[in-house]
Image (tube, grey):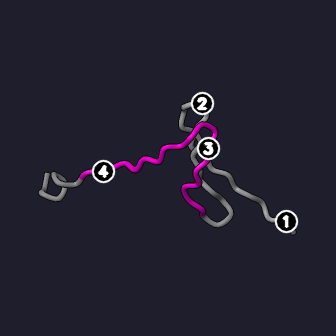
Amino acid sequence: MDEEEKTFKIDPIYEKLAPNEVLIISKEKNCVTYATNENGKLILRKACFTEDE
């Protein structure tokens, strides 16, 4: 294991969500990834929207 691997550390980012609150994490083209607090349980989802012609 080299020196870089020894010092590398992952720091999670926490965002406290109120019950039934939604936080959009990212947007890519016509899709969004979001987190929601459902009765104290964190749920991650991805939603893609269709375009009307």
Q: Residue at x 56, y 59 (%)?
A: 26
Q: Nearer the viewer, mark 2 or mark 4?
A: 2
- Cα separation between marks 4 and 1: 41 Å
- Cα separation between marks 3 and 4: 26 Å
Looking at the image, do the residues carrying marks 1 and 2 touch, with CB atoms under 8 Å apart? no
**Based on the displayed image, in which of its 4 quarters is residue 50 positioned?**
bottom right
Q: Is residue 41 magenta?
A: no
- Cα separation between marks 2 and 3: 10 Å
Q: Secondary structure at mark 4?
A: loop
Classify the position of the C terminus by image quarter.
Answer: bottom right
Kindly identify which numbered label has been placed on residue 52.
Answer: 1
Looking at the image, do the residues carrying marks 2 and 3 touch, with CB atoms under 8 Å apart? no
Kind of residue indicated by mark 1: Asp
Q: Which residue is mark 2?
A: 39
- Cα separation between marks 1 and 3: 28 Å
Q: Which residue is mark 3?
A: 21
* Residue span colored magenta: 9-27
**Total labels drawn:** 4
Q: Secondary structure at mark 1?
A: loop
Q: Residue at x 70, y 56 (%)?
A: 48
Q: Main secondary structure of the magenta part?
A: loop
Please state the horizontal and vertical placement of residue 32, each as a whole percent of the image.
Answer: 63, 57
Left-right relation of 52 to 45: right
**Based on the displayed image, in which of its 4 quarters is residue 27 positioned?**
bottom right
Kind of residue indicated by mark 2: Asn
Kind of residue indicated by mark 3: Glu
Kind of residue indicated by mark 4: Ile
